[in-house]
Image: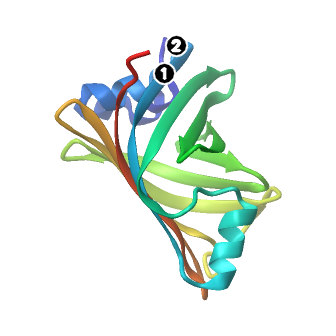
């Protein structure tokens, strides 16, 4: 079975660390646990947007549980950071990874550089309509590994508002 990320990355799939390949090979599910540091933006509007989107609350070294499930259209990524649940649906549109939550669809070109998976933003849709880059959210994201642990770093910013949320953490395959 070829999984979503494997199909999108092609031969570069093999350059990822085993724990990262495991995370993106749900058959039918993968469960990882660890810790995450979360920082929300200081702008009151950024805080309101983060709350409305159900994004995680600020705090260092929060408990993290990540479940990836295979679904017909790709992957369901569920995160529990500090006990708060946030889910996105990942799929494919041509050569791009799509990530949907609420009325948003983010598109990314994936690439592997020195064993690090990079998510290069390639567009945002809101209620199915493409947003111009001047008003689009900006997401920077990377995934990789340190020893046997999966590490990630994700930041979401909005024009004129600034940082909405930044989270980074370390996960290992769950023992239960």
Residue 39 point in image, percent of width and height: 47, 67
Residue 162's disc number: none
Q: Residues within 10 Å of mark 2 (few under 14, many from 20)?
A: few
Residue 27's disc number: 2
Q: Is residue 64 visible?
A: yes
Residue identifier under label 1: 30
Against 44, residue 29 (above or below) is above
In the displayed image of the protein, which residue is found farthest to the bottom? 160
Q: CA distance from mark 1 to mark 2?
A: 7 Å
Nearer the observer, disc 1 or disc 2? 1
Which is nearer the eye, 35 or 120? 35
Which is nearer the eye, 143 or 114? 143
Residue 42: quarter of image? bottom right
Q: Is residue 132 visible?
A: no
Look at the numbered disc 1 and give the secondary structure of its residue.
strand
Marks 1 & 2, CB-CB < 8 Å contact: yes
Which is nearer the eye, 141 or 3? 141
Q: Residues within 10 Å of mark 1 (few under 14, many from 20)?
A: some
Residue 40 point in image, percent of width and height: 53, 70
Against 68, residue 78 (above or below) is below
The structure residue drawn at horizontal position 60% and vertical position 21%, both measured from the top left corner, is: 70
Residue 103 point in image, percent of width and height: 79, 55
Against 81, residue 129 (above or below) is below
Say how the picture is coloured.
rainbow
Q: Is residue 43 found left or right of 118 in the rendered image?
A: right
Which is nearer the eye, 158 or 172? 172
The structure residue drawn at horizontal position 41% and vertical position 32%, both measured from the top left corner, is: 33
Look at the numbered disc 2 and give the secondary structure of its residue.
loop
Residue 118 point in image, percent of width and height: 36, 51
Residue 160: quarter of image? bottom right
Quadrant position of the C terminus in the picture: top left
In the displayed image of the protein, which residue is found farthest to the right? 127
């Amino acid at each position: 079975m070829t999984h979503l990320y494997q199909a999108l990355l092609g031969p570069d799939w093999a350059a990822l660390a085993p724990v990262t390949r495991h995370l993106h090979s749900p058959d039918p599910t993968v469960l990882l646990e660890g810790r995450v540091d979360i920082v929300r933006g200081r702008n009151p509007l950024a805080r309101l947007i983060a709350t409305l989107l159900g994004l995680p609350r600020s705090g260092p070294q929060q408990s993290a549980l990540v479940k990836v499930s295979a679904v017909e259209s790709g992957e369901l990524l569920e995160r529990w950071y500090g006990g708060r649940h946030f889910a996105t649906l990942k799929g494919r549109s041509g050569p791009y990874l799509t990530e949907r939550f609420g009325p948003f669809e983010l598109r990314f070109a994936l690439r592997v550089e020195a064993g690090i998976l990079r998510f290069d933003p390639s567009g945002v849709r809101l209620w199915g309509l493409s947003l111009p880059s001047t008003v689009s959210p900006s997401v920077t994201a990377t995934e990789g590994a340190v020893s046997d642990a999966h590490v990630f770093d994700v930041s979401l910013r909005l024009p004129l508002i600034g940082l909405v949320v930044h989270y980074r953490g370390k996960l290992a395959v769950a023992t239960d």
